[in-house]
Each structure stands twice: as structure tokens, then as C-alpha cells.
Image (cartoon, rainbow, N blue to C red):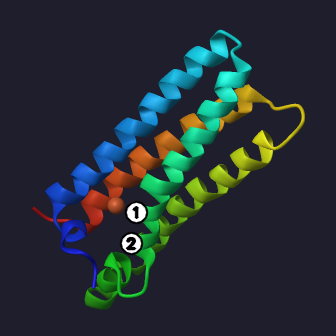
Amino acid sequence: MAGPALKQLHAHRAIHDASLGGAEDHVADMKIMLNKMEHKELAEEMQSFIEYVEQRILTHADSEEEESGLYEETVRNNPDMHDKIQHLTRDHDLMRIMIDKMKEELAKDEVDFQKLVDYSVSIVIVDEIHSRDEEAFLLSE
Ligand SMILES: [Fe+2]
Ligand SMILES: [Fe+2]
């Protein structure tokens, strides 16, 4: 069973908005550090952004996809939703892929910080589009 909060538009949207807002704050800080060439601080901030996205955004995504979770329940109740659920799951996957690429980049001897900032901006954009689509497709007032 999906948790009751995930089935209610207002509660679910509040979870989306809180996690998106926090991610946007991290990105704003990273852009400032990139401009100032503060690479040591930037590497720490990147690490903290990765942990934030994993804990707040990807854990939420995992719970939506888990057995008998929101997505499975939606398709069971309405098989016509199958394709939309696939698209939403692909959005989650894109964010997971970009987080893995960020980890790979951060582990290199010569880190490309601009690339890392680009990934972090992309994650925020995908998360925002995904959240609004999910609210529109799956949740009613
Ligand atoms: Fe989601
Ligand atoms: Fe969600």
C-alpha cells in the first residue's frame, strides 16, 4: 500500500516542493563557489548535494516504485496509466544516472566542476518537470 501522504495531492506536493527547494539552494551555493573558483568548498558542497538528492529525492522515488507502492497501485487500478508510469519511472532513472555520473566525476583526479554544476542544474530541472507531471497524472484534489 502506498503511504497515505503520497496519495493526497497537497501532502505529496509539499514533499516535492520541500525537496526541490533544498536542491535549488544547494545549486545556488555551488554556482557562487564555481564563480569564485572555490574548488575545495565546491567539492564538499557537491558531495553534500549528492547525499541530499539521494536521501530526499531518490528515496522518495524508490518508495513510489516499490512493490505495492503508488505507481504499482495506480496501474493496477487503471491499466491505461501504464505508459505514463513508465515515463515517470524514466524521469527517476535519469536523476539516478546523473547522480552516478556526478560521483564518477568527483572521484577523478582532475574534477570538471562546470560539468558537475551542469548535472546538478539538470537534476533540479528534471525533478521540477517530473514533480508537476506526477501531480497532474496521479493525484487529485
Ligand atoms: Fe516521482
Ligand atoms: Fe512524488
Q: x, y (%) of residue 51?
A: 55, 48
Please tell me which residue lies in front, 93 or 18. 18
**Percent coordinates x, y for residue 69 in the rendering:** 35, 80
Q: If the picture is divided into quarters, which one holds ligand 2? A: bottom left
Judging by the rendered image, the residue that carries numbered circle 2 is 64
Give the quadrant of residue 79: bottom left
* Amino acid under disc 1: His
In this picture, residue 52 sits left or right of residue 37: left
Residue 120 in picture, x, y percent from top left: 58, 38
Q: Which residue is drawn at 48% across and 40% down?
A: 125
Does the residue tagged 1 have its C-beta within 8 Å of any atom of ligand 2? yes
Badge 2 local density, few (<14 within 10 Å), some, or many (20+)?
A: many
Percent across and percent down for residue 134 are 33, 60
Residue 106 lies, with reference to residue 90, above or below; the image says above
**Left or right, residue 8 beside residue 56:** left
Residues at marks 2 and 1 touching, judged by CB atoms closer than 8 Å: yes
| Mark 1 neighbour density, 10 Å: few (under 14) some (14–19) many (20 or more) | some
The span from disc 2 to disc 1 (Cα, nearest Å) is: 6 Å
* SS class, disc 1: helix
| Relative to 32, residue 57 above or below | below
> Ligand 1 near label 2 (Cβ, under 8 Å)?
yes
Pick out the residue farthest to the right: 109
Q: Which amino acid does label 2 sit on?
A: Glu
State the residue in front, 141 or 45.
Answer: 45
Q: Quadrant of residue 3?
A: bottom left
Q: In front here: 40 or 118?
A: 40
- Residue at image location 59% in from the left, 31% down from the top: 45
Find residue 60 and name its label: 1
The C terminus: image quadrant: bottom left
Q: Check disc 2 and report its element: helix, strand or loop.
A: helix
| Residue appearing at x 32%, y 90% in the figure | 76
Image quarter of the N terminus: bottom left
